[in-house]
Amino acid sequence: MIKDPHATAAALLPLVGGPANVTSVAHCMTRLRLGLADRSRVDDEALRAVPGVLGVVEDGASYQVVLGPGVVGRVTTAFEALLAAGGTGTADDRADGDGREGDGEAGRKTAGADDASAAPAVTPAVDTTADTADALARRGAELKARQKARNATPLKTALRRVADIFVPLIPALIGCGIVAGIAGLLTNLRWLPGLTPALTALSSAFMALIAVFVGHNTAKEFGGTPVLGGAVAAVVVYPGVAKVTAFGTALAPGQGGVLGALAAAVLGTYVEKWCRARLPGTLDVLLTPTLTVLVSGLLTLYVLMYAAGEVATAIGTAADWLLTTTGALAGLILGGLFLPLVMLGLHQALIPIHTTLIEQQGHTVLLPILAMAGAGQVGAAAAVYVRLRHDTSLRTTIRSALPAGLLGVGEPLIYGVSLPLGRPFLTACVGGAAGGAFVGLFAMLGTEVGATAIGPSGWALFPLLAGGGGWAVTAGVYGGGLLTGYAVGFLATYFFGLPDGAGRPVCDPEKHEPRPADRPGPRPASPR
């Protein structure tokens, strides 16, 4: 557990190549996300050894250091302060850090030293000339190019971009969702009738205008002007669109939801780039924003809102059909495959689907099923804790990460426990599949479980539950799914997730002597 975020940030900075190698800094709920100029300057093994670091993930677009919930924000703040205070370096250093060629001798020596630490296998034993430094720099560039090529598939790139658009919205989604849950609880209990309208307004305002924020982030992600992306997407939620008719049907405010806003902002970005590439500077200031809003806005009204509305309706229909028809099987598959998505950082790409379902139906039926993956992870970690009772370091990690796991944040357990051990990660997926099948089965029987907001899961999801059978029944089904995930994850890991003898020490932990069974004693004579 990280106690001093400043010390952790100071330890991380040189291991990612120093200030000149960091091009961007951000964080989500559990990960510090860094943009790097030169990937080959990162010392992965040393990073993993830093106290409090639970793992590292590279998705091509960013280098992610898993720190866990709560602490990642403090470490990010300290990391940004170090960048601001420190290390602009020489002109040659800055050029290398920006990814441009540096002709200065100092810049080449720095690159060579960093590459040598990142890839010792290719470092010559004695040659320290400039030619060697250049060779190392070329080697680092080749490694970086291969890594980017491996991760730059069209699907992965698209999913990462979607995640980068929606991840910054998660804190607001969580906060508004919890406020909505409190408002709903007070309404059902008929308590504080004068306060509930205010709480409802607070929780609903962000969702009513979420299209604007999606448009802003989309334009920023695709290289456009963020405020123009927000302006174009704002038309999706403007009440006046009810007077506009497209394909013979009057539009409705919010039609298409976040999908329409996403498409509108992407279109606006391309229109803006087209204008800036062709208009002279004197006209660019006036005509580019005007044409961006006009062209992309009209296409959004007459094409994109209608099309996105149809897609959003299809998503809702498909989700309902999936659970009412094949609920147990769908839950089995979704609950079992969600942990690998979390491991790859691609689970955030599901946020638009959750948000669309919340806009349409008031809740998302997918989140409670996907939350079962975290239950399987908790069960697996508990089994490891019981079996490996002599591994004090691992048990300490489990004790510190388990509270977050119970609240649905599984990354500390993934990167600190199950994934390094191998098989427990697979048995955790088995537990998640069992819990998902449990919740999906009840959906087939008519008891649907949904969540009014995204972000929390595990026990933190209880205040946000919604369903047709009432809160008590919905909570009972969801709680049953969690218990199923815990139990199956525990049993699968206890019996199949660890090698035989994994729970036995090879020596006495106090005296460092062989186990009694291995100590010398009378033995039958051996033939010579």
Image: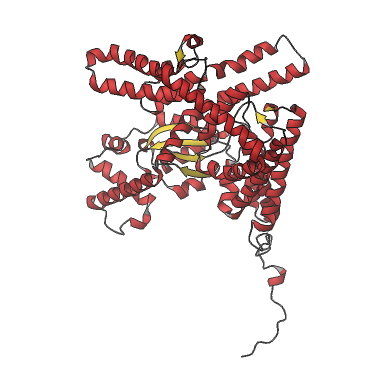
Point out residue 86 in the picture as x, y percentages from the top left corner: 39, 32
Mark yes or no: residue 407 visible: no
| Residue at x-position 28% and y-position 23% | 274
Quarter that holds the N terminus: top right
Point out residue 46 in the picture as x, y percentages from the top left corner: 47, 48
Q: Is residue 451 above or below residue 127?
A: above
Q: Is residue 503 above or below residue 361?
A: below
Point out residue 231 in the picture as x, y percentages from the top left corner: 42, 15
Q: Is residue 149 above or below residue 236?
A: below
| Residue at x-position 68% and y-position 49% | 489
Q: Residue 280 lies in what quarter of the image?
A: top left
Q: Relative to the observer, which residue lies in front, 128 or 347?
A: 347
Q: Relative to the observer, which residue lies in front, 271 or 281?
A: 271
Q: Relative to the observer, which residue lies in front, 325 or 132?
A: 325
Q: Relative to the observer, which residue lies in front, 327 or 93?
A: 327
| Residue at x-position 73% and y-position 36% | 477
Compared across the picture, whether 291 is left or right of 481 comes to left
Mark yes or no: residue 513 visible: yes
Compared across the picture, whether 496 is left or right of 99 comes to right
Quarter that holds the C terminus: bottom right
Point out residue 220 in the picture as x, y percentages from the top left corner: 40, 25
